[in-house]
Image (spheres, grey):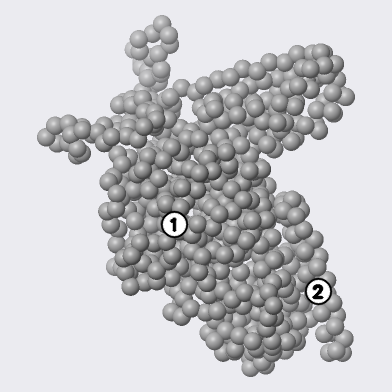
């Protein structure tokens, strides 16, 4: 019976591994799987995790001995019957070779990575050729989904030593992009951008603090950001929303990945939905209590992950257990506890909570429409032992980083520098050594004091595509700045400064609710350009033919930098119209030049009235100032309204909002 069970498990496990390889054949198939994941697949993934554990119990000498020492007894389809493994009880207790399939290495094609040593000692991890091939395909598929482009250029700024992330990222990205592995070298990155020019969609992969360092350096030398399209994929450590907001003043999009040298890189990744949800949890206390619990005040990183590849569980102490569901892994990782604290939730469960708030659900649907990944979510707090206690309070690294960057006009002055005795990464000047990187684990901030590095800029920078505001220091004996404004880099427009819109006096919020800062409102509220258009088609046949290009055009529009929101309306009998919002007019006009929009317009107009009998398009620009309050107000969480209405064209002052009794 044992012999039959062994061979059934072998055949089944190899068959499932082969089946998973089908959706990794091409990034487009990977995206199709991620967008069509269903809850029943989680039950299938759990069954596969159980089979992987049983298969390892038979063919991995170290794991078989580990089970015997822990009094394990076989139970059909019970994953919890297998005791969790970790670095202390399993990795340290058995040799590297004994933890491999059949107790031996695969020599040809295997690569040895080294972990960062954040637990006090660096470890070596051997990965087979098939395992690395799987990792590279998954990372490539995620990249094409989150950073869609036909001209993708990846600048890999991760350290290139024995660590897993740098080398594997470069190899994976080469499947879907042009790649240059610069390592963390500021001058090489800037030279690469200038040499190849703005004709590419650049994705810079780096550690979050290094990306901030790069942004400050490029600003300091007057780099012309305007014609470039730059995004970033970060990892190695956690990233606060305050730091993301700071980076996205220049980068179109910044996304983070999750993984660990112990397990694999690319276990999970951020999407537009997960980023929206994390930002929403900063201010929505009701949603935070519903998702995280009434007493939870920390803000976790949120990733979407694929249980078919990495099956995750949580213990009673909310620590994450991971099983890698493939026989391609040379050192099987079964119910492995890396020490990260987190919470798991399916997409359907998240949707059920969000639907209780129609406004939140509408925003979530808009964010979901960008990537459309239905994979479950991982709420990750980081290592349970990453806190320090002060006056009875637990202080997390995220709290420190958030305080340094959030609403801080002196953020460019701040750089977290570690202990000078730490490990030195290639490309860094002498005296700037860092400790070994903490790979792909949110909540693992770098230690050290904040130091002055470059002269302060007058204030936080606007996002790409927005006009700039130059704050001129006050003059006089009470001034808090230099007597003369700091020289600006050339070709940077200055935003008109309305004193009544920028100043906020204590106790007078109800008089000052007009604003020009819409950074906290939903994307559609940040738009400054809109178009409305409609076409009257000849009949049902024309509308049917239209669909072949229409959906491609809408998909392309949603992926454009600067797109905010759109809706479609219908009028009897055959009129279809669109209303769309963009961050600025240039983004709107770039959409008009896209291939599918051009093809659609030519199809409508080049054949007389065969396909349509009429159409129109109107463009609109938003006023500089508007109105915000509550959680959508950048200047503070205040619910109030203006005292008087905006005057009409023939009025000097508008009437009072509150009617005054005679």
Q: Is residue 11 left or right of residue 655?
A: right
**Counting residues from the N terminus, which is met first, the one under dot 2 or under dot 1?**
2
Q: Outermost residue toward the top?
A: 650
**Element type at mark 2:** helix
Distance between the alpha carbons at the discs numbered 2 and 1: 43 Å
Pick the front one: 567 or 538: 538
Looking at the picture, how far across and down is residue 338, in whole percent?
55, 74
Visible residue check, residue 276:
no
Name the residue carrying label 1.
Answer: 185
Looking at the picture, how far across and down is residue 217, in whole percent?
38, 48
**Which residue sits at x=85%, y=80%?**
8
Q: Quadrant of the N terminus?
A: bottom right
**Element type at mark 1:** loop
- Mark 1 nearby-residue class (10 Å; few <14, some 14–19, many ≥20): some
Name the residue carrying label 2.
Answer: 14
**Which residue sits at x=63%, y=51%?**
177
Q: Is residue 192 above or below residue 523?
A: below
- Mark 2 nearby-residue class (10 Å; few <14, some 14–19, many ≥20): some
Q: Is residue 102 left or right of residue 264?
A: right
Q: Is residue 120 above or below residue 171?
A: below
**Which residue sits at x=56%, y=69%?**
164
Pick the front one: 598 or 479: 598
Residue depth check, mark 2 versus mark 1: number of the one nearer the observer? 1
Looking at the picture, how far across and down is residue 492, in whole percent?
39, 31
Q: Is residue 516 above or below residue 201?
A: above
Looking at the picture, how far across and down is residue 206, in whole percent?
49, 57
Q: Is residue 264 left or right of residue 445?
A: right
Q: For the residues labelled 2 and 1, say whether their Cβ atoms are less than 8 Å apart.
A: no
Q: Is residue 98 left or right of residue 612?
A: left
């Amino acid at each position: 019976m044992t012999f039959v069970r062994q061979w059934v498990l072998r055949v089944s496990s190899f068959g499932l591994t082969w089946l998973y390889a089908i959706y990794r054949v091409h990034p487009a198939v990977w995206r199709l799987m991620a967008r069509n994941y269903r809850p029943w697949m989680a039950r299938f993934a759990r069954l596969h995790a159980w089979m992987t554990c049983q298969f390892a119990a038979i063919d991995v000498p170290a794991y078989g001995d580990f089970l015997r020492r822990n009094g394990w007894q076989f139970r059909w389809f019970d994953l919890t019957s297998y005791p969790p493994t970790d670095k202390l009880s399993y990795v340290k207790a058995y040799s590297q070779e004994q933890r491999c399939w059949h107790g031996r290495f695969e020599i040809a094609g295997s690569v040895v990575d080294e972990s960062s040593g954040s637990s006090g000692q660096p470890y070596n991890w051997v990965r087979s050729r098939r395992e690395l091939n799987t990792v590279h395909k998954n990372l490539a598929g995620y990249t094409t989904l989150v950073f869609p482009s036909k001209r993708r250029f990846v600048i890999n700024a991760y350290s290139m030593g024995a660590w897993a992330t740098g080398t594997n990222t470069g190899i994976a990205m080469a499947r879907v992009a042009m790649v240059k592995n610069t390592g963390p070298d500021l001058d090489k990155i800037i030279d690469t951008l200038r040499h190849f020019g703005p004709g590419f969609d650049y994705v810079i992969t780096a550690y979050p603090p290094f990306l901030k360092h790069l942004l400050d350096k490029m600003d300091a030398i007057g780099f012309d950001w305007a014609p470039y399209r730059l995004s970033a994929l970060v990892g190695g450590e956690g990233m606060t929303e305050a730091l993301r907001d700071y980076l996205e003043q220049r980068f179109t999009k910044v996304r983070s990945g999750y993984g660990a040298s112990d397990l694999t890189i690319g276990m999970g990744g951020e999407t537009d939905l997960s980023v929206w949800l994390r930002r929403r949890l900063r201010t929505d206390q009701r949603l935070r209590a519903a998702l995280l619990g009434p007493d939870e005040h920390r803000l976790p990183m949120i990733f979407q992950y694929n249980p078919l590849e990495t099956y995750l569980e949580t213990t009673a102490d909310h620590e994450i257990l991971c099983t890698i569901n493939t026989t391609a892994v040379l050192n099987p990782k079964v119910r492995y506890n890396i020490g990260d604290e987190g919470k798991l939730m399916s997409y359907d469960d998240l949707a059920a909570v969000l639907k209780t708030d129609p406004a939140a659900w509408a925003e979530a649907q808009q964010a979901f429409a960008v990537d459309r990944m239905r994979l479950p979510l991982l709420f990750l707090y980081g290592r349970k032992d990453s806190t320090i206690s002060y006056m009875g309070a637990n202080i997390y690294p995220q709290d420190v980083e958030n305080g340094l960057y959030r609403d801080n006009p002196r953020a460019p002055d701040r750089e977290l520098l570690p202990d000078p005795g730490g490990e030195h990464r290639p490309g860094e000047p002498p005296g700037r050594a860092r400790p070994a990187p903490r790979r792909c684990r949110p909540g693992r901030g770098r230690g050290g004091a904040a130091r002055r590095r470059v002269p302060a800029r007058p204030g936080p920078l606007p996002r790409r595509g927005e006009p700039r505001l130059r704050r001129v220091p006050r003059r006089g004996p009470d001034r808090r700045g230099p007597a003369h404004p700091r020289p600006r880099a050339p070709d940077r427009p200055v935003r008109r400064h309305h004193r009544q819109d920028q100043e906020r006096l204590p106790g007078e919020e109800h008089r000052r609710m007009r604003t020009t800062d819409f950074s906290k409102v939903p994307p559609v509220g940040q738009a400054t350009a809109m178009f409305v258009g409609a076409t009257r088609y000849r009949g049902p046949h024309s509308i049917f033919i239209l669909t072949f290009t229409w959906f491609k055009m809408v998909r392309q529009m949603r992926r454009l930098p600067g797109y905010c929101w759109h809706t479609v309306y219908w009028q009897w009998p055959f009129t279809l119209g669109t209303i769309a919002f963009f961050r600025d007019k240039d983004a709107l006009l770039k959409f008009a030049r896209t291939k599918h929009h051009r093809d659609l317009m030519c199809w409508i107009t080049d054949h007389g009235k065969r396909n349509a009998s009429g159409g129109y398009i109107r463009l609109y620009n938003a006023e500089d100032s508007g109105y915000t309050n509550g959680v959508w107000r950048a200047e503070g969480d205040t619910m109030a309204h203006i005292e008087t209405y905006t005057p009409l064209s023939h009025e000097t002052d508008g009437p009072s909002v509150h009617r005054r009794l005679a």
